[in-house]
Image (tube, helix red, strand yellow):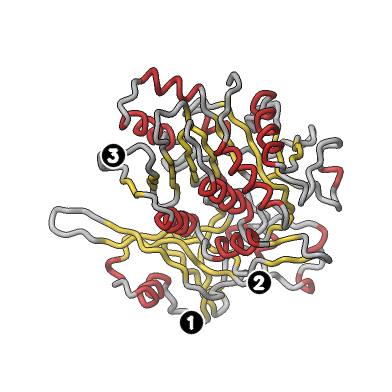
Amino acid sequence: MEYTKALFDFISTSPSCFHVVANIRDVLLKNGFTELKENKLWQLAAGRNYFVEKNGSAIIGFSVPKKDFSGFLVTASHSDSPCFKIKENPEMKSAGVVRLNVEKYGGMLMNPWFDRPLGIAGRVIVSESSGENISVSQRLVDFGKNLVMIPSLAIHMNRTANEGHKIDVQNEMLPLISGNESFNLLDYLSVQTGIAKDSIAGHDLYLYNRDEPSVWGAEDEFISAPKLDDLECVFSTLQGFLNSENSDFAKVFCVYDNEEVGSGSRQGAGSTFLKDTLRRINCCFDRTEQEYMAAVASSFLVSADNAHGVHPNFKSSADPVNQPVVNGGVVIKYNAAQKYTTDGISGGIFKEICRKAQVPFQIFTNNSNVAGGSTLGNISTSQVPFCSVDIGLAQWAMHSPYESAGAKDVEFLVKAIETFYSSKICGKL
């Protein structure tokens, strides 16, 4: 249960993608990593550990061996989760209350957002301009209280509510925040943060579920929490990264943003963030372009994003053969359409890693009548052509504001990733 408690602490202090990265930054600093800036020249030393952020919502940490390295061992996960984002000028008055105008972020299960205690977190952009200089900074915000709620319509007013209802996001999912019709969000932000209202240049604020993570089941075998997709993998790959050593490969820990909306941003898997970082590492050690290309060809990427566990009430939605279960170990994901990058080679390598770590593994394939989702692997490899495997941990209720999984699986993934980062991968990639 040691890892479960630590996972819960990580999730509870990470109400937005910006808080996720801030928490990772603190962990890396405490473990002796040096922060780099993208807009500064880098000077790297062999045997040292570094990290770099982008947009405050994506981060890459890396460890360089003391001797020349033959390639990169990389994990990729993501900091974002499906939720509601608050629009600009959000106040909307109705029936004596003020609601906030919001929009969907990512593919959401929306019904579970009704009747829950919700908070607001993210960042406020603060103007620091003077004279001809245009400058802004960001301030992380989490009001730390049950601030809004989206009440359901009573069954008496919608007798067919349990027979299927298409949700009108613009009109039915607006959270209530105040009974004072003069309420203004920027005024509230200013009072709560101490930032002068005229210095607030913008914001990226999201709703989040304030239900506490929990352990449940007859033998405490299950866990539930907000944002298990994908903070369970973020946490586990970070622990494995920190626990490992490798004298032959450079270790790289990557957390992207915006996976839930396609990864097309400058801080997403479709950007050059990882590629640029690897090329700068190569350059700082006076390695040639050919040496970089050879290193990439010798490298391996583990794309870590949670997987669907077979639902006991909906088994027909799963593949008839490959049905991962919670507490069944690390899930290796395959898809013929390359929504997952796993193939015979990469899957075989990761199976060997799990065997070496003495960790159980299982297989996920989609029901052939169900399109399924996609993740980071194929998008990342479009920028850097690694041999790559897609893995995750089995969970239920993916993209709900409160997801469930197995209490044993976090430790399995930590051990597998520690073994991955500690291995010398010698196969023909």
| Side of 17 where 48 appears, left or right | left
Query: Which is more toward the observer, 31 or 373?
Result: 31
Residue type at numbered disc 3: Trp
Image x and y of residue 354, in percent: 69, 38
- Label 2, secondary structure: give it: loop
Residue 41 in which image quadrant: top left
What's the mark number on residue 264? none
**Mark 3 or 2, which is nearer the eye?**
3
Residue at x 57% of width, y 61% of height = 11
Residue at x 34% of width, y 24% of height = 287
Residue picked out by circle 2: 151
- Quadrant including the C terminus: top right
Image x and y of residue 178, in percent: 51, 78
Task: Tell me if label 1 and label 3 are in contact, CB under 8 Å.
Answer: no
Q: Residue furthest bottom?
A: 180
Image x and y of residue 64, in percent: 41, 37
| Disc 1 from disc 3: Cα separation | 52 Å
Task: Tell me if label 2 and label 1 are in contact, CB under 8 Å.
Answer: no
Residue at x 60% of width, y 65% of height = 209
| Side of 185 where 429 appears, left or right | right
| Side of 429 where 223 appears, left or right | right
Residue picked out by circle 3: 42
Residue picked out by circle 1: 180
